[in-house]
Image: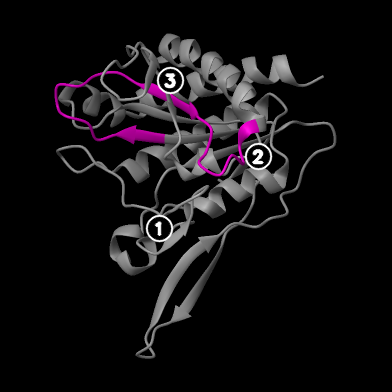
Amino acid sequence: MPSSAEASPVASTVASATGAVTPSPTTPSRAPVVRAGAPVVVLDPGHNGGNAAHPAVVDALVPAGGFEKPCNTTGTETDVGYPEHAFTFDVAQRTAALLRARGTTVVLTRTDDTGVGPCVDERAAVANDAGAALAVSIHADGAPADATGFHVAEPALAPDGGNRAVLDPSDVAARDLLPAFATATGLPRADYPGNLVEPGLTRRSDLAGLNLARTPAVLLEAGNMRNAREAAQLSDPAFRQRAAEGIAAGVAAFLARSTP
């Protein structure tokens, strides 16, 4: 459940040209409660449960660091219908609980799994406005069925150059997360994605959250929902707890390097 250390989204609506009211993307609060001296970590559970029902909202273009991208997407799902948005939200909540137990202030970009959005630029702004020590976006992939493993994406230089200052610390965070997640989950490092730096690590300039980051940021693809074996693992609460433990361990390793 959300705590006082977590931004609370406020649902809103917009009127269409016909007078009908449709949801606008959930807008996170920009004023999280931060405990004095505690590092701030932003966890960004990918997608949202209401996105599929509101394509006009999630398809609207927003800034993405030198170009525009859709506000959000629906995400993928397993072949039996377990959705990525539910996976990411559950893992984010589990990770938040583990990090808070370590004394870390955690802010989630969304605090339920029924809303729409927030847009990708708003998600990045949550971490930027909070002065986060690290932002971790949590996803699961929808790759071909024979593809296996997890990977971490770190930012390449955005087309507008705005994320230049966070490239090096983001690389450190990605390299802390990789072994921690592998150890906790037993998943291999993926070698199927493009833009591979090494197995399990990609560097990308096409992701809005990484392009717009002004604090260290990484994106985790925690396994392939279209691979039958990994889909069964991702659907298992016990595995999701191990995934959360891996993320928390990687974050803790990075914070130990970067905070006094």
Separation of marks 3 and 1 at Cα, in angstroms:
24 Å
Q: Which circle's residue, 1 or 2, is located before the other in the chain? A: 1
Identify the disc placed on residue 114: 1
Quadrant for the N terminus in the image: top right
Q: Nearer the viewer, residue 247 or 159?
A: 159
Residue 109 in sight from this viewpoint: no
Q: Which percent across, then down, holds residue 21?
A: 41, 82
Residue 68 in sight from this viewpoint: yes
Residue drawn at x 70%, y 48% is 129
Residue drawn at x 33%, y 14% is 187
Mark 3 crowd level (few <14, some 14–19, many ≥20, 10 Å Cα): many
Task: Check contact, mark 3 vs mark 1: CB within 8 A.
Answer: no
Mark 1 crowd level (few <14, some 14–19, many ≥20, 10 Å Cα): few
Above or below, comparing residue 9 to residue 212 in the picture: below
- Quarter holding residue 153: top left
Identify the disc placed on residue 242: 3
Q: Where does the magenta region start and end?
A: 139-164
Badge 2 element: loop
